[in-house]
């Protein structure tokens, strides 16, 4: 009762300012908005580690000397980097999803809409992670690589135990910037009717005509999410700062 009274007081206080937040007094709309915020948060929690993992795999492939590996991976990078994420999501959900459904006996794809968002957004940002890591790999001092070879490290061991850990430290500011952009990019989930905060807000304002109020909430919500990612990134930068590099 105390929380309900506080919400009612807040809605009444904001109404003279021209802000109509009466939807929070409706249990159905309030629950829909809360579920939308959880779906958006879940998208971020799933996509961030997935994108980083795929980014490492792509960066590892690009460091190989075989052109049979580097050429197709490079073509994939150019395709993904040079086309909009929204178009990629539409192609994946409307084309690949349909093809998968046609090939299966049951006629239904096992990949849900939220999984398509994680796959598309994750792979899209993984390409940029890979480029940042590739620059970090290039920044590893040559004398460090010579030292690893003198200790008997193979090329694969040198990459996983020497180059990649150092590259992550060098590329961390770029990686954090990519992750901030990833959090914002998850909003495209509403384009294929995934019930994230943007989609649920659209459903609410289509009935209540309170677009401004809900857009303000969306801005605040994503602002808080991106701030959290940026703050975590700055903490990691301080913890993992390379001695002798930077200030």
Image (cartoon, grey):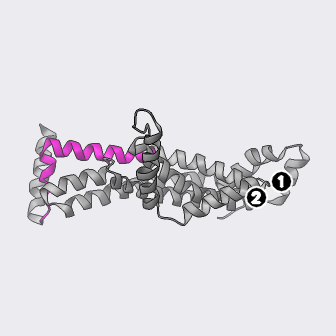
In this image, 30 relative to 197: left or right?
Answer: left
Measure the C-alpha gap from mark 1 to mark 2: 8 Å
109 part of magenta stretch = no
Residue 65 x/y as whole percent: 80, 55
Q: Is residue 227 in view?
A: no
Residue at 26% x, 44% y: name it: 34
Mark number for residue 56? none
Residue 73 x/y as whole percent: 66, 56
Which secondary structure, mark 2?
Answer: loop
- Determine crowd level at label 2: few under 14, some 14-19, many 20+ residues with C-alpha closer than 10 A: some
Establish if 222 lies above or below 34. below
Residue 57 x/y as whole percent: 65, 48
Residue closest to the eye, 94 or 106: 106
Residue at 20% x, 64% y: name it: 212
Tell me the quarter of the picture where residue 191 sits. bottom left
Residue at 41% x, 58% y: name it: 184
Q: What residue sits right under mark 1 in the picture?
A: 145
21 part of magenta stretch = yes
Q: Is residue 73 in view?
A: yes
The disc, 1 or 2, on the residue closer to the chain's N-terminal end is 2
Residue ranking furthest to the right: 150
- Determine crowd level at label 1: few under 14, some 14-19, many 20+ residues with C-alpha closer than 10 A: some
- Which quadrant would the N terminus be assigned to in this image? top left
In this image, 37 relative to 26: left or right?
Answer: right
Which secondary structure, mark 1?
Answer: helix
Tell me the quarter of the picture where residue 245 sits. bottom right
Residue closest to the eye, 200 or 161: 200
- Which quadrant would the C terminus be assigned to in this image? bottom right
Range drawn in magenta: 18-45
Q: What main secondary structure does the magenta stretch of the protein show?
A: helix
Are dots 1 and 2 in contact, CB under 8 Å? yes
Q: What residue sits right under mark 2 in the picture?
A: 140
């Amino acid at each position: 009762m105390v929380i309900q009274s506080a919400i009612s007081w807040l809605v009444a206080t904001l109404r003279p300012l021209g802000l109509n937040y009466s939807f929070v007094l409706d249990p159905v709309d309030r629950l829909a908005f809360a579920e939308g915020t959880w779906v958006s948060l879940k998208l971020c929690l799933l996509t961030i580690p997935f994108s980083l993992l795929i980014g490492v795999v792509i960066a590892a492939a690009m460091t190989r000397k075989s052109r049979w590996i580097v050429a197709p991976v490079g073509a994939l990078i150019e395709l993904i980097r040079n086309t909009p994420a929204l178009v990629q999501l539409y192609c994946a959900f409307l084309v690949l999803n349909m093809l998968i459904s046609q090939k299966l006996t049951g006629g239904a794809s096992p990949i849900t809409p939220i999984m398509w968002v994680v796959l598309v957004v994750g792979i899209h940002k993984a390409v940029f992670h890979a480029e940042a890591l590739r620059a970090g790999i290039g920044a590893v001092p040559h004398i460090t690589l010579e030292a690893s070879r003198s200790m008997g490290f193979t090329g694969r061991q040198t990459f996983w135990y020497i180059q990649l850990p150092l590259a992550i430290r060098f590329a961390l500011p770029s990686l954090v910037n990519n992750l901030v952009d990833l959090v914002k990019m998850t909003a495209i989930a509403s384009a294929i009717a995934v019930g994230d905060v943007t989609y649920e807000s659209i459903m609410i304002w289509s009935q209540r005509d309170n677009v401004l109020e809900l857009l303000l909430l969306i801005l605040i919500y994503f602002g808080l999410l991106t701030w959290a990612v940026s703050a975590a990134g700055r903490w990691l930068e301080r913890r993992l700062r390379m001695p002798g590099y930077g200030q």
